[in-house]
Image (cartoon, rainbow, N blue to C red):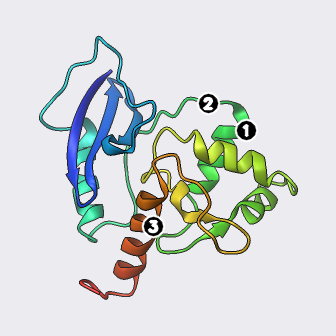
């Protein structure tokens, strides 16, 4: 896979793609499994306008992405990731609410597992899912990134830039 790094307010964000679309994204400083395929080539800019869209998102000027996403996962994971894309910018849902919306009440843990394995964070907004008690819960990239993304969206939803 080819890849590029995009500077964000919380560090570099990597985007990896093939000719047919974007397969992975991750916060470089988050640790964990962040390796790209050895045959991957680093580019100065991301394909499909991903760099421009992510830069606009982090500047508070973009709320909805238009990118060719190619997440790979189980049928259930793909269903969860599709539902996540319907969560409006600046809002949150609980794991249980998301499970119920998929017709799987009681599958909150499975939804959490799918969120944890989301290969395209930010664009597939798994950060918008929180515990039923409002607590952030886990985030594959680390809770500090989740908190940043939620605060960022809240600030830009209400137009309070700089607050």
Give how far apart the Cα atoms at labels 3 and 2 are. Answer: 26 Å
Q: Quadrant of the C terminus?
A: bottom left
Q: Is residue 12 above or below residue 84?
A: above
Between residues 112 and 64, which one lies in front from this camera angle?
Answer: 112
Give how far apart the Cα atoms at labels 3 and 1 are. Answer: 26 Å
Return the disc, 3 or 1, that comes first in the chain's sequence: 1
Name the residue: 71% across, 60% down.
95
Name the residue: 33% across, 20% down.
1
Seen as rendered, the residue at the extreme left is 44
Label 2 Cα crowd, 10 Å radius (few <14 / some 14-19 / many 20+):
some
Between residues 121 and 64, which one lies in front from this camera angle?
Answer: 121
> In the image, which is nearer the foreground, mark 3 or mark 1?
3
Label 1 Cα crowd, 10 Å radius (few <14 / some 14-19 / many 20+):
few
Name the residue: 36% across, 72% down.
152
Seen as rendered, the residue at the extreme top is 39
Identify the disc placed on residue 76: 1
Coordinates of residue 85 in the picture (x, y in percent)? 54, 56
Question: According to the image, label 3 marks what residue?
Answer: 147
Q: Is residue 128 above or below residue 118?
A: below
Q: Is residue 93 left or right of residue 123?
A: right
Q: Is residue 74 left or right of residue 53?
A: right
SS for tag 2? loop
Q: Quadrant of residue 129?
A: bottom right
Coordinates of residue 113 in the picture (x, y in percent)? 68, 43
Coordinates of residue 6 in the picture (x, y in percent)? 21, 46
Question: According to the image, label 2 marks what residue?
Answer: 73
Label 3 Cα crowd, 10 Å radius (few <14 / some 14-19 / many 20+):
some
Q: Are marks 1 and 2 in contact (CB under 8 Å)?
A: yes
SS for tag 3? helix
Give how far apart the Cα atoms at labels 1 and 2 are. Answer: 8 Å
Coordinates of residue 83 in the picture (x, y in percent)? 64, 54
């Amino acid at each position: 896979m080819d890849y590029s790094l995009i500077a964000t307010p919380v560090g570099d964000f990597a985007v990896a793609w093939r000719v047919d679309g974007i397969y992975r994204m991750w916060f470089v400083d988050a640790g964990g499994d962040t390796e790209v395929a050895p045959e991957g080539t680093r580019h100065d800019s991301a394909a499909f306008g991903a760099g421009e869209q992510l830069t606009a998102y982090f500047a508070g000027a973009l709320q909805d992405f238009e990118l060719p996403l190619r997440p790979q996962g189980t049928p259930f994971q793909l269903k969860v990731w599709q539902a996540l894309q319907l969560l409006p910018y600046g809002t949150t849902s609980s794991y249980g609410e998301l499970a119920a919306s998929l017709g799987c009440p009681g599958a909150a843990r499975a939804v959490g597992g799918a969120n944890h394995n989301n290969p395209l964070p930010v664009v597939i907004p798994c950060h918008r899912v929180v515990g039923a008690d409002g607590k952030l819960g886990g985030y594959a990239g680390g809770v500090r990134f989740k908190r940043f993304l939620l605060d960022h969206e809240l600030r830009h939803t209400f137009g309070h830039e700089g607050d």
